[in-house]
Image: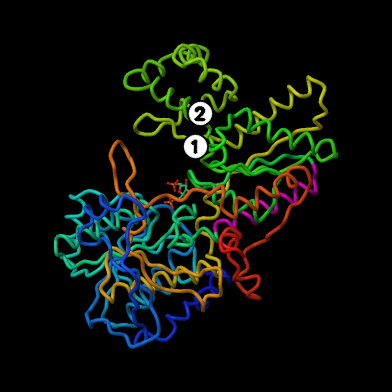
């Protein structure tokens, strides 16, 4: 295999464990805390999880290991979108498993949860594992988006586990995958299969966090990667002084990624979807807000700037979601074929005009034609508009252009307005994990095995106190049911882990809010540069601004 120098160097990196896990397996004992309750809907959740509800929070500490001696055969699954550090979760799990008993076995189910259902696996061993230490990506076993959620699937999973003598499954995934891990744990317990299920919190989106889970892994590296790129663009923009850059960043519905990048780079504008929803902002109001910055900067001779746009923002604009649901309705059933048979865009436009309410038509009419057409082209298998595919960076730059044209016509000086567009998402999902993610992920995996060895099921591997140096991190586990509440999903009430959106009264947003007026008008860019893997800890081991602000630092 051809290796880059960094790859070789990263193989040698020893991830840092929390101090309490550094004593060696024989000296790790459990301290049980209080029994837990779900964050809401306790009666319903406890009724749905009779075998796994109400268990105690646990932490590990130094002391005689009292776990039963038992050969463990563990299966691991990577679920959903890639996030830097996934390989280290598998490596940490493997190392703890082998350090406990060299006869223990780790199965890696391939291609995500479907690997378990299809009994498609690889047995992980030293030589193979060593090629993936401290590297980005999920290619060690692959990932997938099959959901493990039906009783039939659980029965198949139980059969596969029985066939291989599997004693525990570790699911590395986001809020949905960990919700499903809790349901699977309950199924395995209710059916006396003897299979434990442990989850690990993954997602670059940063939306799997709560009072117990301080951060999902991958968020640190992905946001550092995007922030490096945004900082570079800011510097280019401040050098050439001729473009407004509109940059969309991944993150699904939540704006944690956009907000963290803004805190790292101090762009002129960053939209926050949760604020757009709270203030019920219209497209026009958002465009005006950006246009105000363009005009103010133009007055100072600065015809350039940077705007960060969270991936999900259009879904949060009330008039836009109304438009989307009307379009979905307009093309439901056989009407899609009727629409597609129309000869040209003019005929299609007339069809649309006839089918939409006047309010939605007003919104539709102000969209650039490319976006209008996109709304009718990119549809999911159910025929619905795929909101995440909408090029919102182009949408907002065009809407701002229209606003500036109006203002110019009314006599306002608007300077020059030339735009460029970017979308940063996949660039950050498989980066070499930062030291933080390498350490955090290895610890999550190592810790997951300790939970298995001590017989816990339905728990999320929990490592906390993350804004401090790794030796002060606290390792333990939290029953997943503690993080659950009932929500309406696809027309049914379901027990789910609550998705964390940006809190408008939280410290990260408050900091941004206090500074954004200055950033909008002046050039306050900061340049985070590339992730540093070697060098002083003050440069290499720092985590996100979001975490630091949340911790009051
Ligand atoms: P997860 O929620 O599975 O962690 O994935 C996150 C994410 O990267 C989102 O930010 C993005 O919207 C989505 O995955 C893209 O999905 P895909 O990889 O299927 O294109």
Residue occupying the point 42% across, 80% down: 21
Q: Position of residue 226 (x, y in %)?
A: 60, 53
Q: Which residue is mark 1?
A: 389
Decide if residue 251 is on the left or right side of residue 107. right
- Mark 1 is surrounded, within 10 Å at the Cα level, by few (under 14), some (14 to 19) or many (20 or more) other residues, namely few
Q: Nearer the viewer, residue 529 or 485?
A: 485
Q: Which residue is mark 2?
A: 374
Q: Secondary structure at mark 2?
A: helix
**Residue 335 falls in which quadrant of the image?**
top left
Labels 2 and 1 touching (C-beta < 8 A): yes
Q: Earlier in the sequence, mark 2 or mark 1?
A: 2
Spatial CA distance of label 2 from label 1 is 9 Å
For residue 429, above or below residue 7? above
Q: Nearer the viewer, residue 34 or 309?
A: 34
| Magenta residue span | 222-241
Q: Is residue 229 magenta?
A: yes
User: What is the magenta segment's predominant secondary structure?
Assistant: helix
């Amino acid at each position: 295999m051809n290796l880059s120098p960094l790859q070789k160097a990263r193989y040698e990196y020893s991830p840092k464990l929390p101090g309490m896990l550094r004593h060696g397996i024989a000296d790790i004992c459990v301290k049980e805390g209080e029994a837990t309750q779900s964050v809401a809907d306790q009666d319903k959740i406890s009724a749905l999880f009779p075998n796994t509800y109400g268990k105690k929070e646990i932490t590990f500490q130094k002391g005689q290991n009292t776990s039963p001696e038992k050969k463990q055969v563990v299966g691991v699954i990577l679920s959903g979108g890639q996030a830097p550090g996934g390989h280290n979760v598998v490596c940490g799990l493997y190392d703890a498993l082998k350090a406990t008993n060299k006869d223990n076995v780790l199965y890696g189910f391939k291609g995500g949860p479907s690997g378990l259902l299809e009994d498609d696996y690889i047995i992980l061993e030293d030589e193979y594992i060593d090629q993936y230490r401290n590297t980005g990506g999920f290619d060690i076993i692959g990932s997938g988006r099959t959901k493990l959620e039906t009783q039939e699937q659980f029965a198949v999973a139980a059969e596969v586990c029985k066939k291989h003598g599997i004693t525990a499954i570790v699911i590395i995934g986001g809020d949905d995958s960990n919700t499903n891990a809790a349901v699977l744990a309950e199924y395995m317990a209710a059916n006396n299969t003897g299979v434990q299920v442990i989850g690990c919190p993954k997602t670059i989106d940063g939306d799997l966090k709560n009072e117990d889970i301080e951060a999902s892994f991958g968020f640190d590296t992905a946001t550092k990667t995007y922030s490096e790129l945004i900082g570079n663009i800011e510097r280019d923009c401040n050098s050439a002084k001729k473009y407004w850059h509109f940059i969309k960043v991944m993150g699904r519905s939540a704006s944690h990624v956009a907000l963290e990048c803004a805190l790292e780079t101090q762009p002129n504008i960053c939209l926050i979807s949760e604020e757009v929803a709270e203030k019920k902002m219209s497209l026009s109001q958002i465009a005006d807000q950006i246009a105000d910055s363009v005009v103010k900067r133009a007055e100072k001779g600065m015809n350039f700037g940077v705007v960060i746009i969270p991936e999900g923002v259009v879904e949060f604009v009330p008039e836009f979601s109304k438009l989307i649901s009307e379009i979905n309705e307009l093309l439901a059933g056989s009407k899609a074929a009727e629409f597609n048979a129309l000869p040209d865009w003019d005929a299609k436009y007339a069809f649309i005009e006839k089918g939409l309410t006047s309010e939605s038509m007003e919104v539709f009419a102000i969209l650039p034609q490319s976006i209008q057409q996109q709304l009718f082209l990119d549809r999911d298998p159910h025929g619905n508009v795929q909101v995440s595919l909408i090029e919102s960076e182009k949408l907002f730059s065009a809407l701002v252009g229209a606003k500036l044209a109006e203002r110019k016509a009314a006599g306002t000086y608007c300077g020059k307005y030339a735009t460029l567009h970017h979308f940063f998402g996949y660039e950050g999902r498989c980066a070499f994990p930062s030291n933080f993610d390498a350490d955090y992920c290895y610890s999550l995996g190592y810790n997951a095995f300790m939970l298995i060895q001590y017989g816990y099921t339905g728990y999320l591997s929990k490592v906390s106190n993350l804004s401090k140096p790794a030796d002060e991190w606290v390792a333990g586990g939290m029953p997943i049911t503690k993080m659950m509440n009932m929500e309406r999903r696809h027309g049914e009430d379901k027990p789910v882990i609550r998705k964390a959106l940006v809190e408008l009264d939280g410290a990260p947003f408050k900091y941004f809010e206090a500074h954004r007026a200055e950033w909008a008008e002046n050039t306050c860019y900061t340049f985070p540069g590339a992730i540093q893997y070697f060098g002083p800890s003050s440069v290499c081991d720092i985590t996100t601004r979001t975490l630091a602000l949340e911790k009051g630092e």
